[in-house]
Amino acid sequence: MNTRFLRPRPLAALAASAILSFAGSAEAGHGVPPKSSTDVSATSSKTTRPGGSSSWVYKVLATNDLGMHCVDADFSVFSILPPYNVVNAQVVRRSGTGRPNVVNDSIVTLRYEAVRDGNGSINSRSRGKSNFWQYAAQTYGASLADGEGLKGLYMPGDTRQLAQKSFRWDPGSGLFKAEGVPILPLDDAGNVNRYPLMRVVAVERATGRTVASTDVVLPVSEETTCANCHATGTAAASDPAVAWSTHANLEVQSRENVLLLHDHQHGTRLFASKPVLCASCHYSPALDLAGAGPNGTQSAHAKMSSVMHAFHADKMHDPSGAALPDAWLRQGQQPPDADRQSCYQCHPGKTTQCLRGAMTDAVTCQNCHGDMRAVGGADPLRAGGSIDGTNDGGSRRPWQDLPRCQSCHTGDATDHVTLDPSLMATDGIRTLVAFDPLDPAASPFLARNKRFAENDGKLFRFSKGHSGVACEGCHNSTHAIWPNPVDLHNDNVAAKQLQGHSGTISECSACHAAGSLPLTLRGPHGMHNVGDPNWTSKHESFAESNLQACAACHGTDFRGTALSRTADVRTWNTEYGTRTVPKGRAVGCYDCHNGPYDD
């Protein structure tokens, strides 16, 4: 495979021909399965250990890395992003009631397989779904076989070679990685499904047996469009001095208009050179797969993030001329409709709604990232604003100096940052903005209490926590933190397989044998045993000697906080009788007895 795409080459004057796009395809329910599905059950098998009588139990923790991957709907004019999805995975193994451990490729290999969701939608192939392969050589300098991704992977239905649908072990990150899966948002029936499921299968090397699998979403959306502003006759394509495109395909038309406008304003000849790769001139870390940094041509131009965000920051208006919302939300404010949010004019999107999951009821994109000027790096970062401290005072580096979990999850119930009430979540513990609202660069806060912080100098998606498990393995992907509020959404399938319900992987039995743990406060983020009858029956004296630790989640009044909400319906057999509490209840001492000192 030719890998020149790792460093975008100069533009080539090549003609466009046939066009395949996603326009007109039927919807497939946006990844929401019906009330029952027999095709998404988890697998956790036992296998005999060579030379012994005990057995191993395996679990696969796997997630998409970003929560959404974008792909161009057409490649005949220009390209911003190719078909390129990334799945990270870890395999946890234990023997009987022994301690689970994360294992590497000396123990298991991983592959991915297409699987039907509850709607019957399956996405097994990419051939015939996009014109990417027709233009890959011109745009990405990559000589690809039909259906081949930029790193040599294929969709499962496009290959019979195991290596072309297998994860590689990355010793640097300690993860199994499937990088560059060329999935597209059309299922095999031609219906749009932007949240297709893919099964991650673990095979034990010693026996060749399939020992575990988990079904994860490979989110992908073509709803990355310029048509809202650049279709002929709209605000950015109305200058009578330019002969705007008359192409019948709206996506192609708006893309041609972008090149025509660029040529008109900057004296370039992009329209005559199509198809072009935007990153050939405007550096994008997302396409610098070798991590080599900007080349000479790119260094002479603004970065892609700057030209897309900072440049367009004052140009976002709806057809009536009203400015589109580009601001963060205070407590009690409702997010604007998706079709009026500035981010969704370009990013997936009015239908896709890239930001989803647990946070969407209280915040929008700007609460974490700041406005478009901030995202584009128009203002210098404050102290602590850069991810590693080396770029404080500089412009935000795209894909690097990003918001952090600790910027809003600043601590526990007894030790956290308190801002103006309008900037705090209703629980009074979390903030609703990740930065000082007076800071135009939206430099992320750094928490003093690191209980819910990422690893120092790393983003959430690169961080690990409890026993070396990736943070995303328990919380799911950035932008899609569990649970998705639609219970039957495909996003929730993996969590249900691993622990029996949606939400953060919080049940100890997801990895540990039930009842195998002693009383402990060494769980993730300092948690005690969860869903374990041993804790229910024996924790009282343990708690009385660790009341400050209990207060961190249950509150100083020990009546419960958002940090002690039940992840599922709980039924406990206690000396006071059977207690049942619903999912989402903020549990405290008074649910079973009269406070923390009641004997």
Image (cartoon, helix red, strand yellow):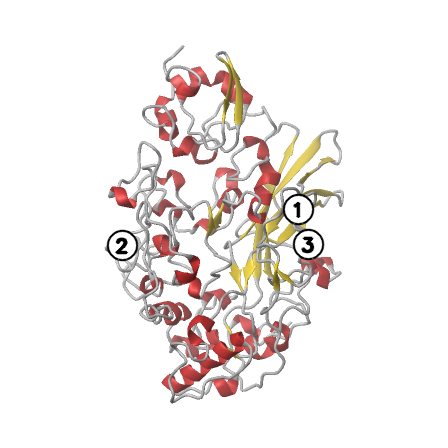
User: Which label is found at residue 129?
Assistant: none
Amino acid under disc 1: Ser
Amino acid under disc 2: Ala
Q: Quadrant of the N terminus?
A: bottom right
Which mark is in front, 2 or 1? 2
Instruction: Answer above or below: position of 233 versus 309.
Output: below
Which of these two is toward me, 227 or 111? 227
**Residue farthest front in this picture:** 320
Distance of label 3 from label 2 (alpha carbons) = 46 Å
The reply to whether residue 288 is in sight is no
Q: Residue at label 2?
A: 383
The reply to whether residue 200 is in sight is yes
Position of residue 336 measured from the top left corner of the image (x, y, whole percent): 38, 56
Q: Determine the secondary structure under disc 2.
A: loop
Q: Residue at label 3?
A: 114
Q: Residue at x 49, y 77 (%)?
A: 255
Q: Residue at x 50, y 33 (%)?
A: 567
Distance of label 1 from label 3 (alpha carbons) = 25 Å
